[in-house]
Image (spheres, rainbow, N blue to C red):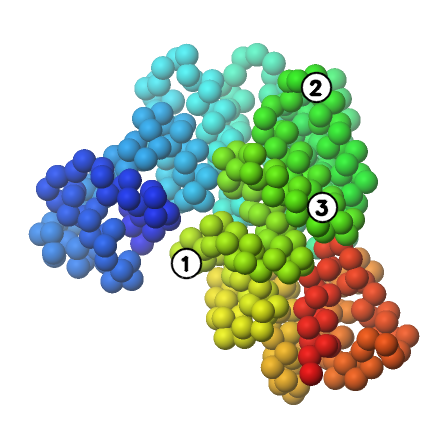
Amino acid sequence: MSLLLSFVSFLNSEERKHFSMLPLCGKEKLLRDIMLTREHALISKPSLMKELALTSTHYDKINTQVLKKSYRFIAGDDELEQLNFLSKKFMFNHLFHEIRQLKAKVINGEVNPENKDKYIRAIFDFSINVPAKYFNESFVNQNGVFYLSQVNDNIKAREFEVKAKMLFARLNSLTQKCPSSSVTIKMKKEIAALEKKYATVEYPEIKSILYHCWINFYRMLIPDWKKRTLYLEKIQNLYKKDNVPIFERAIYECHKAEVLYEKGEFAKAYLAYTKTFSSYMLLLRNQFHHFARWIELALILGLYSEAEQLLDSLFKVYVNNRHESNGVLGSLLYAEMYLLKNDFNNAFQYLSLAKSLNSIQVYFIYEIRIRMREALFFALNGDKRFVERLVQRCVRYIQLQKLDQERYTYLQFFRILKDYQNIKATYPDRLSSKSKELLKPFESGYEKLNELLLKKLLDKN
């Protein structure tokens, strides 16, 4: 898919309408109109070259020209605003291409000297602030070295900034993979060592990056809401009360809502997320982890209409465009909603889509969740023999990952499914001590959605 066609596919209805008014003429206009009105699966370079009577070189040139005009028309003339638009729309192939173009301009002295420092920082920031699927450590390292080579003041603070951001990005990538106790311990030591080495750096905007590393560590690797709360407050204390940057205030509220979720205060957490996103949505447009938590809470509370509205507005475009990260997460959330609503046809459709989009090597957390939902789906549909085979494969898969079983509930979930008919016969009042022990981890916190799905299975007549 060309960059222009990919760009068009990620536009929402309002942006598409705006894009249709981009002043073009001749073959540029024809190309734009075709991409807006024709099914993208039916569009190919050879067919368009023939239809528009273009050579390959001329076709590529027109694509590039229309793409550049599109960025300016939709995101404005400022190149950094264009990068920001591409980042928030998760158009990372486009983003990386534009980063390279801007870097070449800086190197060749084609930017205003007054903006040079702002540009070199943006080149590094935009290359690193991406999902794990798109994190290119070599590319980011090059941009980090380039950034440090171009600055002449506050060198130690700048080094701390680059190292802290790199550590945060690596931590984000790590949390998407199969959890490893040894790697988790190593990461904890790295964060602590970096904190100690740069303890004298007083810049709040830099030190807060390191504290965000701790927050994510205690959110994704070793969930601990008390320690997350500690570092959230440390970030607030870095600034004078009235000088906390607006984004830090917004993300602070997201994390506080998630803490309520982990503590099992679901209604309060849902209301906190609703209030936060109502106030700060423009700043938080790419916080898909928190969007997912918000939707999970709606499902837990039985607010299916609200959950569907949120899914349609926040995830549908990524699902429809088969996005490798948000498309998987969105598909899973749709599937869970339809399982809870007993709409098994739609649940199976979205589970199948999630399976086709996910990459096991990058997104282990999605892979295991897909396996859990798939086995549950067939259990809900009474296919006992197939469930037994699925469970056997899933247990073997988990065992091969060498997980710390005391910290994860995956095996317990599959053991319940393996014996669900016997558990169902005694659920909920005559459960054996073994069954009670299997079900206990799912009673609250982040496991509550699993409990509701299991309850639907065990309560089913």
Quarter of the image that includes the N terminus: bottom left
User: Local crowd at mark 1 within 10 Å, few (<14), some, or many (≥20)?
Assistant: some
Residue that badge 3 annotates: 268
What kind of element bears circle 1? helix
Indicate the amino acid at tag 1.
Asn
What kind of element bears circle 3? helix
Indicate the amino acid at tag 3.
Lys
Q: Nearer the viewer, mark 2 or mark 3?
A: 3
Separation of disc 3 and disc 1 at Cα? Answer: 32 Å
Q: Residue furthest right?
A: 433
Q: Nearer the viewer, residue 436 or 395?
A: 436
Which corner quadrant of the image does residue 170 belong to?
Answer: top right
What residue is at 20 percent from the left and 52 percent from the top?
Answer: 34
Whether residue 6 is visible to the viewer of this picture, yes or no, is no
Separation of disc 2 and disc 3 at Cα? Answer: 25 Å
What residue is at 29 percent from the left and 50 percent from the top?
Answer: 5
Measured as percent of width and height from the top left, residue 289 is found at: 60, 47
Point out the tag, 3 or 1, that comes first from the N-terminus.
Answer: 3
Q: Nearer the viewer, mark 2 or mark 1?
A: 2
User: Local crowd at mark 2 within 10 Å, few (<14), some, or many (≥20)?
Assistant: few
What residue is at 53 percent from the left and 62 percent from the top?
Answer: 334
Q: Is 373 located above or below residue 448 in the figure?
A: below
Measured as percent of width and height from the top left, residue 446 is found at: 72, 55
Residue that badge 2 annotates: 241
Q: Is 21 located above or below residue 305 in the figure?
A: above
Residue that badge 1 annotates: 320
Point out the tag, 2 or 1, that comes first from the N-terminus.
Answer: 2
Label 2 close to label 1 by CB (< 8 Å): no
Quarter of the image that includes the C terminus: bottom right
Q: Is 225 located above or below residue 282 in the figure?
A: below
What kind of element bears circle 2? helix
- Judge left or right: residue 284 versus residue 180: left
